[in-house]
Image (cartoon, helix red, strand yellow):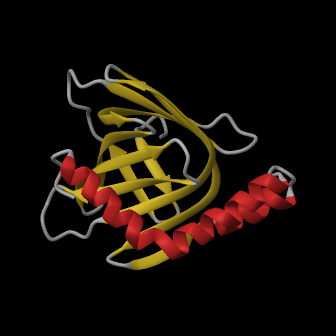
Amino acid sequence: MDRAGLVTSESFTYRALPLTPGTPGVIEAKRHPGDEGHRFECELVATRSGLVVVRLPLEAPYGAVNSYGPFWARRPYNVYHLVPRDPGVPIRTRFDVLRDMRLDVTDAGGEVSYVDLYLDLWVTDGVTMWEDEEDVEAARASGVLSDADLARIVRGRMVLERGYPRIIREVRSTLRELGVRA
């Protein structure tokens, strides 16, 4: 997120909205190999063994959305499940391929941190779109990505290509258990 509160990628620009006062906060600390990264202030939705769920309210070109981020300790990806506040607008889901996930969160808040390995998968109404493949190639060519990183990217892509429908169902089920319209 930049200083103006904008979250951007190739396919979107969202503006962060105010968090709910009094809600425990979680910092999402995301960096790419070789950079300092970004920090996002989020709200804690739930914490369970090996799983933290956060919410970041955003203003999108098509209206306000709640971005729910389930972060698992041992998966090669994370998820942002963008639920529009207005009915009839498609739900979008983004996956980031990553490594080194750390969940330092209690019921009072904390920090989620990881290394983003550039490659993202967007799913909107069942249609998939890979994003930032050129960033992966540029990082590979410049030596920023290790052989282990490249192998993890290949593995993450395979897991997501085969499993994204199941993972989205799991995310929606988890959010519904937490009382979220998903």
Placement of the C terminus among the 4 image quadrants: bottom left
Any part of residue 2 in sight? yes
Please provide percent x and percent y for residue 169: 32, 66
Among all residues in the image, which is located at the extreme left?
A: 87
Relative vertical location of residue 23 with respect to residue 171 in this rendering, above or below: above
Please provide percent x and percent y for residue 90: 25, 70
Within the image, what quadrant is residue 168 found in?
bottom left
Q: Nearer the viewer, residue 117 or 12?
A: 117
Q: Residue at x 49, y 39 (%)?
A: 2
Any part of residue 135 in sight? no
132 lies left or right of 43 = right
1 lies left or right of 55 = right
Relative vertical location of residue 18 with respect to residue 121 in this rendering, above or below: above
Q: Residue at x 20, y 69 (%)?
A: 89
Relative vertical location of residue 182 with respect to residue 112 in this rendering, above or below: below
Give the total number of marks visible in the rendering. 0
Among all residues in the image, which is located at the extreme bottom?
A: 127
Within the image, what quadrant is residue 137 found in?
bottom right
Q: Residue at x 35, y 34 (%)?
A: 47
Within the image, what quadrant is residue 32 found in?
top right
Q: Residue at x 25, y 51 (%)?
A: 175
Please provide percent x and percent y for residue 44: 31, 32
Please provide percent x and percent y for residue 40: 45, 35
